[in-house]
């Protein structure tokens, strides 16, 4: 109710200021000023009464689990499931979203904003489609090169592990199981861990390669769409 009263008060102050201006010019053309003043005050009074009537009798419609409630006051902060503000004729003047809906709306706005930023960056980074394709091939080529080097490392480690395993077997054959030199067991375990780490890194880089390829495919499609839109 306070908001409605403030709005009406604002209209009244405007009317007073405009009335004062008209009264100052009355000495130059009294008859025309009186007529204008009368019409202006009548129009403003009508608008003020209309606004006051529309908001003073506002009805708040709340819906909660299928239950519809009408009340003559705004819901408190705990009732944050959204509501409608209706005038005295049942026409919706304003729709207030729930907290969850506002959160989802902000999320959509953020996604749209990020999409616009991505589009601008895409056009600013790549002059032509060939530039984008070359960049994609370079990125994927770097990952493929790293995977290839890891394969070579695994091969070398596997060869070294085979030698250590053979030495362990020879010593255990003569001294008994678990009786080989401790340094051989330590080296054996170290090589096995390094091989496992290399395989894990290969898996990670293979997943990264797939993500990069998919991203550039999406960028390429979007780039073509943006170029088509711009003619």
Image: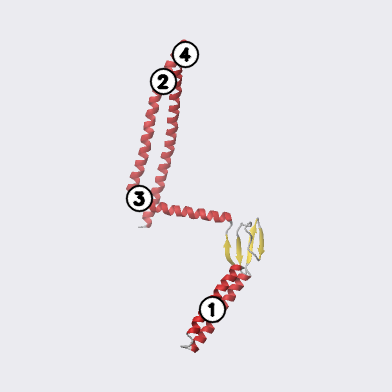
Image quadrant where one finds the N terminus: bottom right
Q: Which residue is mark 4?
A: 172
**Which one is in front in this view, the residue at disc 2 or the one at disc 4?**
4
Mark 1–mark 4 distance (CA, rounded to whole Å): 108 Å
Mark 2–mark 4 distance (CA, rounded to whole Å): 15 Å
Q: Which residue is mark 2?
A: 162
Look at 39% across and 22% down and name the residue there: 160
Image quadrant where one finds the C terminus: bottom left
Task: Looking at the image, tell me whether mark 3 or mark 2 is earlier in sequence order.
Answer: 3
**Which one is in front in this view, the residue at disc 1 or the one at disc 3?**
1
**Which one is in front in this view, the residue at disc 1 or the one at disc 2?**
1
Mark 4–mark 3 distance (CA, rounded to whole Å): 63 Å
Q: Secondary structure under badge 1?
A: helix
Q: Which residue is mark 3?
A: 125
Mark 3–mark 2 distance (CA, rounded to whole Å): 50 Å
Asked if residue 74 lies left or right of residue 39, the reply is right
Task: Looking at the image, tell me whether mark 2 or mark 4 is earlier in sequence order.
Answer: 2
Q: Which residue is mark 1?
A: 16
């Amino acid at each position: 109710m306070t908001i409605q009263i403030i709005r009406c008060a604002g209209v009244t102050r405007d009317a007073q200021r405009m009335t004062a201006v008209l009264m100052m010019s009355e000495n130059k053309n009294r008859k025309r000023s009186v007529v204008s003043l009368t019409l202006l005050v009548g129009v403003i009074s009508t608008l003020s009464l209309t606004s006051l009537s529309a908001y003073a009798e506002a009805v708040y419609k709340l819906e909660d689990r299928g239950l519809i409630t009408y009340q003559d006051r705004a819901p408190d902060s705990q009732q944050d499931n959204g509501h409608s503000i209706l005038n005295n004729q049942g026409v919706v003047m304003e729709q207030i979203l729930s907290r969850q809906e506002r959160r989802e709306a902000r999320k959509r706005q953020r996604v749209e904003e990020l999409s616009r930023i991505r589009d601008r960056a895409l056009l600013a980074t790549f002059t032509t489609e060939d530039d984008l394709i070359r960049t994609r091939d370079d990125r994927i080529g770097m990952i493929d090169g790293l995977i290839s080097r890891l394969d070579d490392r695994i091969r070398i480690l596997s060869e070294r592990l085979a030698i250590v395993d053979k030495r362990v077997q020879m010593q255990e054959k003569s001294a008994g199981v678990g009786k080989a030199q401790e340094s051989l067991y330590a080296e054996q375990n170290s090589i096995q861990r390094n091989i496992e780490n290399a395989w894990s890194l290969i898996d990670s880089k293979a997943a990264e390669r797939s993500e990069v390829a998919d991203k550039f495919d999406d960028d390429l499609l979007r780039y073509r769409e943006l170029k088509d839109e711009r003619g």
